Amino acid sequence: MSAQGTLQEKSEGPLIAVEDLHTYYGKSHILHGVSLTVGRGEVVGLLGRNGVGKSTTLKTIMGLIYPKQGRIMLEGKAVTSTPAHKLAKLGIAYVPEDRRIFRLLTVMENLRTGLDRPGVTDERKKELLDKVFSYFPVLGERRDQAGGTLSGGEQQMLAIARAMMLEPKIILLDEPTEGLMPRMVSQIRQIIDVLHSEGVAILLVEQNVPLTLEASQRVYIMEKGAIRHHAVSSELKIDDPVIKQYLGV
Ligand SMILES: Nc1ncnc2c1ncn2[C@@H]1O[C@H](COP(=O)(O)OP(=O)(O)OP(=O)(O)O)[C@@H](O)[C@H]1O
Ligand SMILES: [Mg+2]
């Protein structure tokens, strides 16, 4: 990011600030006061064992579940309980755990679903597609193939590429490397770096602790529906006792 961008980030406060979220599924109280921030262009990791509420945190931020208590601020304005499609227009993109690409649509058609929105000129559409095909050459090669015929890693790329078509301020990424082969994991890692270099913020939910510490600037660790630890990623070593306490097996 430019020096100017960094200065703006400081004067304007966080891009997203989540304050004291309490989320329920029916009567089950899942999030117990989750608070976190993501700065403009910042990559923030959200770690925690299975079932601690990481995906629920992302779904609550995305307006797919409304919290019973707490606030979600986007660029200083409350957006709590705003429906997902409106948040998407405000610049929040979401790539869920199950990737949810359109299996029967081609790669190109999948990407176009993110481009067909008001105010995007044909020239801009072409620029965005060219950019994605330069980052993900395999998607260019397979542009006419149905999404469902791609490998798991390619589908993950397509899901992220489709989110990029929306030109979001932030992408909420839920376990993008889950179940992928090591070569694909390192490609996803590179994509995170590319997005970061373009100034897109990311809230990255992961089980891969080393990757998250490398790719992010800060990390939060969750347990039982609450944030238990918050650190600067470069200062948290993989053998730190908190890693063992909250993430070890
Ligand atoms: N739709 C739902 N209805 C009821 N309970 C749910 C629902 N979705 C998740 N839960 C429960 O909420 C808790 C938190 O789930 P969540 O998916 O947020 O965890 P997670 O940290 O993302 O876990 P994982 O690492 O397995 O993806 C779990 O106990 C889960 O069983
Ligand atoms: Mg999850």
Image (cartoon, grey):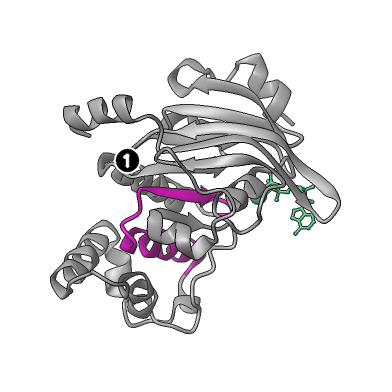
**In this view, 236 is above or below 80:** above
**In this view, 98 is above or below 74:** below
Q: Secondary structure at mark 1?
A: helix
Q: Quadrant of residue 133?
A: bottom left
The amino acid type of the residue labelled 1 equals His
**In this view, 73 is above or below 55:** above
* Of residues 32 and 46, the one drawn nearer to the viewer in this rendering: 32
| Horizontal side, residue 120 vs residue 143: left or right | left
Q: Position of residue 232 (x, y in %)?
A: 47, 20
The magenta stretch spans residue 163: yes
| Horizontal side, residue 33 vs residue 11: left or right | right
Quadrant assignment for the N terminus: top left
Q: Quadrant of residue 41?
A: top left
Quadrant assignment for the C terminus: top right
**In this view, 169 is above or below 45:** below
Q: Position of residue 18 (x, y in %)?
A: 55, 37
Where does label 1 land, which residue? Answer: 196
Q: Position of residue 112 (x, y in %)?
A: 33, 75
Write down the region rendered in magenta: 151-179
Q: Quadrant of residue 107?
A: bottom left
Numbered disc total: 1
